[in-house]
Amino acid sequence: MQRLLVALLAAFDAAISAAVGLVALLAPLTLLWTLAFGATADWGALWPLTGTLWAFGHGVPLDVTIGQEVLIAVGVPTEAATFTLSVAPLAFLVFTVLFAARSGRRAARAGAWAIGALSGAVAFGVIAAGVAVTTRLAALETSLLLAIVLPTAAYLVGALCGAIRIAWEDGDAGLVDRIHDRVDAAGDWAPVPAAIARGSAFALVAVVGTAALGLAVMTLLRGGEVVALFQAARVDALGAGVITLGQLFYLPTLLVWAASWLAGPGFAVGTGTAVSPAGTQLGVVPGIPVLGLLPENGSIWMLIVVLLPIAAGAVAGWVVRSRLVWEGTPLGSAPRAVIAGGIAAVTAGVAAMSALLAGGSMGPGRLAEAGPAVGPFALALGGEVLLGAAILLLSPRNRDELAEERTDRWVAEMTASGPGIGSVPDAAFDGQATATDRLSDDTAPLDDDVRFSPPPRDPGGRDD
Protein backbone atom coordinates (compact mmCIF):
# COMPACT_ATOMS: atom_id res chain seq x y z
CA MET A 1 0.00 0.00 0.00
CA GLN A 2 2.88 2.36 0.76
CA ARG A 3 4.35 1.90 -2.71
CA LEU A 4 0.98 2.62 -4.26
CA LEU A 5 0.73 5.78 -2.18
CA VAL A 6 4.22 6.87 -3.26
CA ALA A 7 3.29 6.28 -6.91
CA LEU A 8 0.10 8.31 -6.57
CA LEU A 9 1.89 11.18 -4.84
CA ALA A 10 4.63 11.18 -7.50
CA ALA A 11 2.00 11.30 -10.24
CA PHE A 12 0.32 14.17 -8.43
CA ASP A 13 3.65 16.02 -8.27
CA ALA A 14 4.07 15.55 -12.02
CA ALA A 15 0.59 16.93 -12.64
CA ILE A 16 1.37 19.99 -10.51
CA SER A 17 4.65 20.56 -12.36
CA ALA A 18 2.95 20.46 -15.75
CA ALA A 19 0.06 22.64 -14.55
CA VAL A 20 2.39 25.33 -13.15
CA GLY A 21 4.35 25.49 -16.41
CA LEU A 22 1.20 25.75 -18.50
CA VAL A 23 -0.39 28.36 -16.24
CA ALA A 24 2.82 30.44 -16.36
CA LEU A 25 2.16 30.75 -20.10
CA LEU A 26 -1.63 30.75 -20.12
CA ALA A 27 -2.06 33.61 -17.62
CA PRO A 28 -0.05 36.29 -19.48
CA LEU A 29 -1.37 35.10 -22.84
CA THR A 30 -4.93 35.42 -21.56
CA LEU A 31 -4.24 38.97 -20.40
CA LEU A 32 -2.62 39.80 -23.74
CA TRP A 33 -5.53 38.26 -25.60
CA THR A 34 -8.04 40.33 -23.62
CA LEU A 35 -6.21 43.64 -23.94
CA ALA A 36 -5.30 43.20 -27.60
CA PHE A 37 -8.46 41.69 -29.07
CA GLY A 38 -11.15 42.45 -26.53
CA ALA A 39 -14.24 40.36 -25.95
CA THR A 40 -14.53 39.45 -29.63
CA ALA A 41 -11.21 37.59 -29.66
CA ASP A 42 -10.92 34.09 -31.06
CA TRP A 43 -10.37 32.23 -27.78
CA GLY A 44 -10.07 28.92 -29.59
CA ALA A 45 -6.47 29.68 -30.56
CA LEU A 46 -5.34 30.51 -27.02
CA TRP A 47 -4.93 26.96 -25.73
CA PRO A 48 -3.15 25.63 -28.86
CA LEU A 49 -0.68 28.51 -28.67
CA THR A 50 -0.07 27.88 -24.97
CA GLY A 51 0.58 24.17 -25.43
CA THR A 52 2.85 24.75 -28.43
CA LEU A 53 4.97 27.29 -26.58
CA TRP A 54 5.14 24.97 -23.54
CA ALA A 55 6.56 22.19 -25.72
CA PHE A 56 8.93 24.71 -27.32
CA GLY A 57 10.17 25.61 -23.83
CA HIS A 58 11.20 21.96 -23.37
CA GLY A 59 13.40 22.00 -26.47
CA VAL A 60 10.91 20.98 -29.17
CA PRO A 61 11.71 22.87 -32.43
CA LEU A 62 8.99 24.96 -34.07
CA ASP A 63 8.35 25.05 -37.81
CA VAL A 64 7.04 28.57 -38.36
CA THR A 65 4.90 29.46 -41.36
CA ILE A 66 3.98 33.13 -41.91
CA GLY A 67 0.80 33.84 -43.80
CA GLN A 68 0.77 35.81 -47.03
CA GLU A 69 -1.19 38.69 -45.49
CA VAL A 70 1.38 39.13 -42.73
CA LEU A 71 4.24 39.00 -45.25
CA ILE A 72 2.70 41.82 -47.25
CA ALA A 73 1.87 43.91 -44.17
CA VAL A 74 5.31 43.56 -42.60
CA GLY A 75 7.28 43.64 -45.83
CA VAL A 76 9.09 40.36 -45.27
CA PRO A 77 10.48 38.57 -48.37
CA THR A 78 8.61 35.51 -49.54
CA GLU A 79 11.58 33.19 -48.98
CA ALA A 80 11.40 34.01 -45.25
CA ALA A 81 7.84 32.78 -44.94
CA THR A 82 8.94 29.39 -43.59
CA PHE A 83 11.73 28.75 -41.12
CA THR A 84 12.59 26.71 -38.04
CA LEU A 85 12.86 28.13 -34.54
CA SER A 86 14.92 25.93 -32.22
CA VAL A 87 16.63 28.28 -29.74
CA ALA A 88 14.34 27.43 -26.85
CA PRO A 89 13.45 29.41 -23.72
CA LEU A 90 14.96 26.95 -21.27
CA ALA A 91 13.24 28.38 -18.17
CA PHE A 92 10.43 25.85 -18.61
CA LEU A 93 12.82 22.91 -18.91
CA VAL A 94 14.86 24.03 -15.90
CA PHE A 95 11.70 24.35 -13.80
CA THR A 96 10.56 20.86 -14.84
CA VAL A 97 13.92 19.30 -13.96
CA LEU A 98 14.10 21.01 -10.56
CA PHE A 99 10.51 20.13 -9.66
CA ALA A 100 11.08 16.53 -10.75
CA ALA A 101 14.24 16.32 -8.62
CA ARG A 102 12.22 17.46 -5.60
CA SER A 103 9.62 14.77 -6.29
CA GLY A 104 12.34 12.14 -6.69
CA ARG A 105 13.88 13.07 -3.34
CA ARG A 106 10.51 12.69 -1.63
CA ALA A 107 10.00 9.27 -3.21
CA ALA A 108 13.49 8.15 -2.13
CA ARG A 109 12.87 9.21 1.47
CA ALA A 110 9.64 7.20 1.37
CA GLY A 111 11.63 4.10 0.38
CA ALA A 112 10.35 3.68 -3.19
CA TRP A 113 12.50 5.89 -5.38
CA ALA A 114 12.24 3.79 -8.56
CA ILE A 115 8.46 3.55 -8.47
CA GLY A 116 8.15 7.24 -7.64
CA ALA A 117 10.42 8.36 -10.49
CA LEU A 118 8.78 6.07 -13.05
CA SER A 119 5.20 6.88 -12.04
CA GLY A 120 5.95 10.62 -12.10
CA ALA A 121 7.55 10.36 -15.54
CA VAL A 122 4.62 8.30 -16.87
CA ALA A 123 2.11 10.82 -15.52
CA PHE A 124 4.08 13.72 -16.99
CA GLY A 125 4.32 11.88 -20.31
CA VAL A 126 0.57 11.33 -20.41
CA ILE A 127 0.01 15.04 -19.77
CA ALA A 128 2.58 15.98 -22.43
CA ALA A 129 0.86 13.65 -24.90
CA GLY A 130 -2.51 15.22 -24.14
CA VAL A 131 -1.09 18.71 -24.59
CA ALA A 132 0.66 17.76 -27.85
CA VAL A 133 -2.45 16.18 -29.37
CA THR A 134 -4.80 19.03 -28.44
CA THR A 135 -2.54 21.95 -29.38
CA ARG A 136 -1.85 21.56 -33.09
CA LEU A 137 -1.33 24.82 -35.01
CA ALA A 138 -0.80 25.26 -38.72
CA ALA A 139 1.42 28.32 -38.26
CA LEU A 140 3.53 26.74 -35.48
CA GLU A 141 4.02 23.05 -36.13
CA THR A 142 5.88 20.73 -33.78
CA SER A 143 6.88 17.11 -34.07
CA LEU A 144 4.28 15.08 -32.17
CA LEU A 145 6.89 12.52 -31.07
CA LEU A 146 9.35 15.13 -29.81
CA ALA A 147 6.57 17.05 -28.07
CA ILE A 148 5.92 13.92 -25.99
CA VAL A 149 9.42 12.51 -25.57
CA LEU A 150 11.46 15.63 -24.69
CA PRO A 151 9.28 16.92 -21.79
CA THR A 152 8.97 13.38 -20.44
CA ALA A 153 12.72 12.80 -20.68
CA ALA A 154 13.41 16.08 -18.85
CA TYR A 155 11.11 15.07 -15.99
CA LEU A 156 12.55 11.55 -15.81
CA VAL A 157 16.15 12.80 -15.67
CA GLY A 158 15.33 15.25 -12.90
CA ALA A 159 13.43 12.66 -10.86
CA LEU A 160 16.18 10.06 -11.18
CA CYS A 161 18.91 12.53 -10.21
CA GLY A 162 17.06 13.63 -7.09
CA ALA A 163 16.04 10.11 -6.11
CA ILE A 164 19.40 8.41 -6.63
CA ARG A 165 21.19 11.11 -4.65
CA ILE A 166 19.04 10.47 -1.58
CA ALA A 167 19.08 6.69 -2.06
CA TRP A 168 22.89 6.73 -2.26
CA GLU A 169 23.19 8.68 0.99
CA ASP A 170 20.40 7.04 3.02
CA GLY A 171 20.18 3.60 1.38
CA ASP A 172 17.25 1.90 -0.31
CA ALA A 173 17.65 -1.78 0.69
CA GLY A 174 17.84 -2.62 -2.99
CA LEU A 175 19.83 -1.93 -6.14
CA VAL A 176 21.52 1.26 -4.96
CA ASP A 177 22.67 -0.40 -1.73
CA ARG A 178 24.16 -3.32 -3.65
CA ILE A 179 26.05 -0.94 -5.91
CA HIS A 180 27.10 1.09 -2.87
CA ASP A 181 28.45 -2.06 -1.17
CA ARG A 182 30.47 -3.02 -4.23
CA VAL A 183 31.89 0.48 -4.43
CA ASP A 184 32.78 0.41 -0.72
CA ALA A 185 34.65 -2.86 -1.29
CA ALA A 186 36.91 -1.18 -3.84
CA GLY A 187 39.34 0.05 -1.17
CA ASP A 188 41.02 3.33 -2.05
CA TRP A 189 38.70 3.73 -5.06
CA ALA A 190 35.52 3.68 -2.95
CA PRO A 191 35.21 7.48 -2.45
CA VAL A 192 35.80 8.22 -6.14
CA PRO A 193 32.17 8.16 -7.48
CA ALA A 194 30.81 10.33 -4.68
CA ALA A 195 33.73 12.74 -5.04
CA ILE A 196 33.12 13.05 -8.79
CA ALA A 197 29.44 13.80 -8.25
CA ARG A 198 30.16 16.36 -5.52
CA GLY A 199 32.92 18.06 -7.47
CA SER A 200 30.87 18.19 -10.67
CA ALA A 201 27.98 19.83 -8.83
CA PHE A 202 30.25 22.51 -7.38
CA ALA A 203 31.97 23.09 -10.72
CA LEU A 204 28.66 23.54 -12.55
CA VAL A 205 27.29 25.85 -9.87
CA ALA A 206 30.46 27.93 -10.03
CA VAL A 207 30.30 28.15 -13.84
CA VAL A 208 26.64 29.19 -13.77
CA GLY A 209 27.43 31.75 -11.06
CA THR A 210 30.25 33.31 -13.07
CA ALA A 211 28.04 33.37 -16.18
CA ALA A 212 25.29 35.13 -14.22
CA LEU A 213 27.83 37.62 -12.87
CA GLY A 214 29.10 38.30 -16.39
CA LEU A 215 25.56 38.83 -17.67
CA ALA A 216 24.86 41.25 -14.81
CA VAL A 217 28.04 43.21 -15.58
CA MET A 218 27.08 43.49 -19.26
CA THR A 219 23.62 44.68 -18.24
CA LEU A 220 25.18 47.48 -16.22
CA LEU A 221 27.64 48.42 -18.97
CA ARG A 222 25.28 48.19 -21.95
CA GLY A 223 21.88 48.82 -20.41
CA GLY A 224 21.53 51.95 -22.54
CA GLU A 225 21.67 49.87 -25.73
CA VAL A 226 18.86 47.66 -24.43
CA VAL A 227 16.72 50.71 -23.66
CA ALA A 228 17.45 52.14 -27.11
CA LEU A 229 16.27 48.93 -28.77
CA PHE A 230 13.10 49.01 -26.67
CA GLN A 231 12.46 52.55 -27.90
CA ALA A 232 13.25 51.62 -31.50
CA ALA A 233 10.66 48.86 -31.37
CA ARG A 234 7.94 51.51 -30.82
CA VAL A 235 5.75 49.28 -28.69
CA ASP A 236 3.30 50.33 -26.01
CA ALA A 237 3.42 49.28 -22.36
CA LEU A 238 1.68 45.98 -23.14
CA GLY A 239 4.15 45.14 -25.88
CA ALA A 240 7.10 46.08 -23.71
CA GLY A 241 5.75 43.85 -20.94
CA VAL A 242 5.37 40.90 -23.32
CA ILE A 243 8.91 41.36 -24.67
CA THR A 244 10.33 41.58 -21.15
CA LEU A 245 8.49 38.45 -20.05
CA GLY A 246 9.74 36.55 -23.08
CA GLN A 247 13.32 37.60 -22.37
CA LEU A 248 12.99 36.41 -18.78
CA PHE A 249 11.96 32.99 -20.07
CA TYR A 250 15.16 33.02 -22.13
CA LEU A 251 17.38 33.82 -19.12
CA PRO A 252 18.78 30.24 -18.76
CA THR A 253 19.52 30.24 -22.49
CA LEU A 254 21.43 33.50 -22.13
CA LEU A 255 23.40 32.02 -19.23
CA VAL A 256 24.54 29.17 -21.50
CA TRP A 257 25.65 31.70 -24.11
CA ALA A 258 27.51 33.69 -21.44
CA ALA A 259 29.23 30.53 -20.13
CA SER A 260 30.37 29.69 -23.66
CA TRP A 261 31.77 33.23 -24.01
CA LEU A 262 33.67 32.88 -20.73
CA ALA A 263 35.03 29.49 -21.77
CA GLY A 264 36.48 31.00 -24.93
CA PRO A 265 34.65 29.56 -27.98
CA GLY A 266 31.83 32.10 -27.72
CA PHE A 267 28.65 31.84 -29.76
CA ALA A 268 27.07 32.90 -33.03
CA VAL A 269 24.13 35.19 -33.76
CA GLY A 270 23.83 34.26 -37.41
CA THR A 271 25.79 32.52 -40.11
CA GLY A 272 29.35 33.82 -40.34
CA THR A 273 29.17 35.71 -37.02
CA ALA A 274 31.18 35.16 -33.85
CA VAL A 275 31.04 36.66 -30.37
CA SER A 276 34.01 35.59 -28.26
CA PRO A 277 36.62 37.15 -25.96
CA ALA A 278 39.17 37.08 -28.78
CA GLY A 279 36.99 39.17 -31.07
CA THR A 280 33.47 40.01 -32.16
CA GLN A 281 32.28 39.82 -35.74
CA LEU A 282 28.65 40.78 -36.19
CA GLY A 283 26.56 41.75 -39.13
CA VAL A 284 22.98 42.91 -38.93
CA VAL A 285 21.33 41.37 -35.87
CA PRO A 286 17.63 41.32 -34.98
CA GLY A 287 16.31 44.26 -32.99
CA ILE A 288 15.62 42.15 -29.92
CA PRO A 289 16.39 44.33 -26.89
CA VAL A 290 18.42 41.70 -25.03
CA LEU A 291 20.81 41.45 -27.98
CA GLY A 292 21.94 44.95 -27.08
CA LEU A 293 24.10 43.27 -24.42
CA LEU A 294 26.37 41.85 -27.13
CA PRO A 295 29.85 43.41 -26.98
CA GLU A 296 30.72 45.49 -30.01
CA ASN A 297 34.32 44.34 -30.15
CA GLY A 298 36.79 42.06 -28.44
CA SER A 299 40.47 41.92 -27.65
CA ILE A 300 43.04 39.20 -27.26
CA TRP A 301 43.52 40.49 -23.71
CA MET A 302 39.93 39.58 -22.90
CA LEU A 303 40.94 35.91 -23.06
CA ILE A 304 41.90 36.36 -19.43
CA VAL A 305 38.26 35.54 -18.65
CA VAL A 306 39.06 31.85 -19.27
CA LEU A 307 40.62 31.94 -15.82
CA LEU A 308 37.10 32.01 -14.39
CA PRO A 309 36.18 28.47 -15.56
CA ILE A 310 39.61 27.33 -14.37
CA ALA A 311 38.80 28.88 -11.00
CA ALA A 312 35.48 27.01 -11.00
CA GLY A 313 37.39 23.76 -11.45
CA ALA A 314 39.76 24.78 -8.68
CA VAL A 315 36.81 25.38 -6.36
CA ALA A 316 35.50 21.90 -7.16
CA GLY A 317 38.93 20.37 -6.51
CA TRP A 318 39.30 22.25 -3.22
CA VAL A 319 35.87 21.11 -2.02
CA VAL A 320 36.61 17.47 -2.87
CA ARG A 321 40.07 17.55 -1.32
CA SER A 322 38.81 19.20 1.87
CA ARG A 323 36.08 16.58 2.18
CA LEU A 324 38.57 13.75 1.71
CA VAL A 325 40.84 15.18 4.41
CA TRP A 326 37.90 15.69 6.77
CA GLU A 327 36.77 12.09 6.24
CA GLY A 328 40.31 10.81 6.79
CA THR A 329 40.65 9.20 3.36
CA PRO A 330 43.98 10.39 1.86
CA LEU A 331 43.81 8.93 -1.65
CA GLY A 332 46.77 8.26 -3.89
CA SER A 333 47.60 10.07 -7.09
CA ALA A 334 45.69 7.69 -9.38
CA PRO A 335 42.27 8.02 -7.64
CA ARG A 336 42.69 11.79 -7.43
CA ALA A 337 43.51 11.96 -11.13
CA VAL A 338 40.40 9.92 -11.92
CA ILE A 339 38.32 12.29 -9.77
CA ALA A 340 39.66 15.31 -11.65
CA GLY A 341 38.98 13.62 -14.99
CA GLY A 342 35.49 12.60 -13.90
CA ILE A 343 34.62 16.15 -12.85
CA ALA A 344 35.81 17.46 -16.22
CA ALA A 345 33.90 14.76 -18.13
CA VAL A 346 30.61 15.43 -16.33
CA THR A 347 31.02 19.18 -16.79
CA ALA A 348 31.75 18.74 -20.49
CA GLY A 349 28.73 16.47 -20.91
CA VAL A 350 26.39 18.98 -19.27
CA ALA A 351 27.94 21.76 -21.37
CA ALA A 352 27.31 19.78 -24.57
CA MET A 353 23.68 19.12 -23.65
CA SER A 354 23.16 22.76 -22.70
CA ALA A 355 24.67 23.99 -25.97
CA LEU A 356 22.47 21.58 -27.92
CA LEU A 357 19.34 22.96 -26.25
CA ALA A 358 20.41 26.63 -26.28
CA GLY A 359 21.59 26.68 -29.88
CA GLY A 360 20.06 26.18 -33.30
CA SER A 361 17.95 28.45 -35.46
CA MET A 362 16.40 31.74 -34.38
CA GLY A 363 14.98 32.91 -37.67
CA PRO A 364 15.11 32.66 -41.46
CA GLY A 365 18.13 33.11 -43.70
CA ARG A 366 21.39 33.83 -41.95
CA LEU A 367 19.72 33.52 -38.54
CA ALA A 368 19.51 29.76 -39.02
CA GLU A 369 22.74 29.43 -37.00
CA ALA A 370 22.80 30.82 -33.47
CA GLY A 371 24.14 29.91 -30.05
CA PRO A 372 27.30 28.11 -28.95
CA ALA A 373 28.81 25.24 -30.93
CA VAL A 374 28.42 21.96 -29.05
CA GLY A 375 31.88 20.47 -29.54
CA PRO A 376 34.10 23.52 -28.92
CA PHE A 377 32.09 24.61 -25.88
CA ALA A 378 32.18 21.15 -24.27
CA LEU A 379 35.89 20.61 -24.96
CA ALA A 380 36.94 24.09 -23.81
CA LEU A 381 34.91 24.08 -20.59
CA GLY A 382 35.85 20.49 -19.76
CA GLY A 383 39.55 21.19 -20.31
CA GLU A 384 39.51 24.35 -18.21
CA VAL A 385 37.68 22.67 -15.34
CA LEU A 386 40.09 19.73 -15.59
CA LEU A 387 43.06 22.09 -15.25
CA GLY A 388 41.64 23.82 -12.19
CA ALA A 389 40.56 20.61 -10.48
CA ALA A 390 43.87 18.88 -11.18
CA ILE A 391 45.85 21.76 -9.66
CA LEU A 392 44.06 21.34 -6.35
CA LEU A 393 43.69 17.56 -6.34
CA LEU A 394 47.14 16.55 -7.57
CA SER A 395 49.28 19.11 -5.78
CA PRO A 396 51.50 17.78 -2.95
CA ARG A 397 49.80 17.44 0.40
CA ASN A 398 50.67 20.09 2.96
CA ARG A 399 52.03 19.56 6.46
CA ASP A 400 48.63 19.60 8.15
CA GLU A 401 47.32 16.81 5.92
CA LEU A 402 50.43 14.68 6.42
CA ALA A 403 50.44 15.25 10.19
CA GLU A 404 46.79 14.30 10.45
CA GLU A 405 47.39 11.19 8.36
CA ARG A 406 50.35 10.11 10.53
CA THR A 407 48.36 10.69 13.71
CA ASP A 408 45.43 8.62 12.46
CA ARG A 409 47.75 5.81 11.36
CA TRP A 410 49.58 5.79 14.74
CA VAL A 411 46.30 5.67 16.66
CA ALA A 412 45.11 2.79 14.50
CA GLU A 413 48.35 0.85 15.00
CA MET A 414 48.33 1.35 18.77
CA THR A 415 44.71 0.28 19.00
CA ALA A 416 45.36 -2.86 16.98
CA SER A 417 48.55 -3.86 18.85
CA GLY A 418 47.23 -3.88 22.44
CA PRO A 419 45.02 -2.18 24.97
CA GLY A 420 43.93 1.37 24.39
CA ILE A 421 46.36 4.24 24.67
CA GLY A 422 46.88 5.22 28.26
CA SER A 423 45.04 2.14 29.55
CA VAL A 424 45.55 1.22 33.23
CA PRO A 425 45.07 -2.21 34.82
CA ASP A 426 41.77 -2.78 36.53
CA ALA A 427 43.48 -3.42 39.89
CA ALA A 428 44.69 0.15 39.95
CA PHE A 429 41.10 1.27 40.29
CA ASP A 430 40.35 -0.76 43.47
CA GLY A 431 41.37 1.97 45.85
CA GLN A 432 39.67 4.59 43.78
CA ALA A 433 36.47 2.55 43.75
CA THR A 434 36.57 2.28 47.57
CA ALA A 435 37.06 6.01 47.90
CA THR A 436 34.22 6.60 45.52
CA ASP A 437 32.01 4.35 47.59
CA ARG A 438 32.89 6.30 50.72
CA LEU A 439 32.20 9.53 48.89
CA SER A 440 28.80 8.25 47.91
CA ASP A 441 28.16 7.34 51.58
CA ASP A 442 29.14 10.84 52.64
CA THR A 443 26.60 12.33 50.25
CA ALA A 444 23.75 10.08 51.43
CA PRO A 445 20.80 11.76 53.22
CA LEU A 446 21.51 12.44 56.92
CA ASP A 447 18.29 10.79 58.04
CA ASP A 448 19.56 7.44 56.80
CA ASP A 449 22.80 7.60 58.83
CA VAL A 450 22.65 6.08 62.36
CA ARG A 451 25.12 8.65 63.64
CA PHE A 452 22.63 11.45 62.95
CA SER A 453 19.44 9.61 63.96
CA PRO A 454 17.36 11.25 66.78
CA PRO A 455 17.27 9.52 70.24
CA PRO A 456 14.40 7.07 70.83
CA ARG A 457 11.22 8.43 72.41
CA ASP A 458 10.12 7.58 75.95
CA PRO A 459 7.58 4.76 76.04
CA GLY A 460 5.25 7.01 78.04
CA GLY A 461 5.29 9.54 75.28
CA ARG A 462 7.43 12.13 77.22
CA ASP A 463 10.87 13.39 76.23
CA ASP A 464 13.69 13.69 78.72
Image (tube, grey):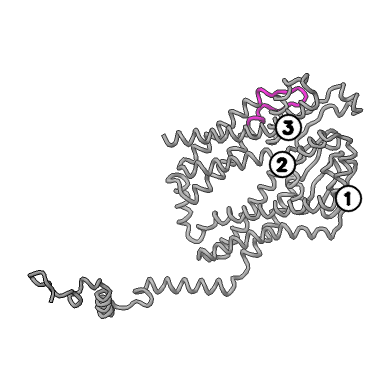
Label 2, label 1: how far apart the Cα atoms are:
25 Å
Q: Looking at numbered disc 1 in the image, what kind of residue is underneath it?
A: Glu
User: The N terminus lies in which quarter of the figure?
Assistant: top left
Between 134 and 78, which is closer to the camera in this rendering? Answer: 134
Q: Amino acid at mark 2?
A: Leu
Q: Are marks 3 and 1 in contact (CB under 8 Å)?
A: no
Image location of residue 293, percent across then percent down:
83, 47
Q: Which mark is residue 356?
A: 2
Q: Secondary structure at mark 2?
A: helix
Q: Amino acid at mark 3?
A: Pro
Q: Which region is colored magenta?
A: 132-148
Which mark sits nearer the N-terminus, 2 or 3? Answer: 3
**Residue positioned 63% across, 68% down in the render:** 395
- Residue 28 tag number: 3
Residue 449 horizontal side relative to residue 223, left or right? left
Q: Which residue is mark 1?
A: 296
- Circle 1 packing at 10 Å, graded few (<14), some (14-19), many (20+), is few
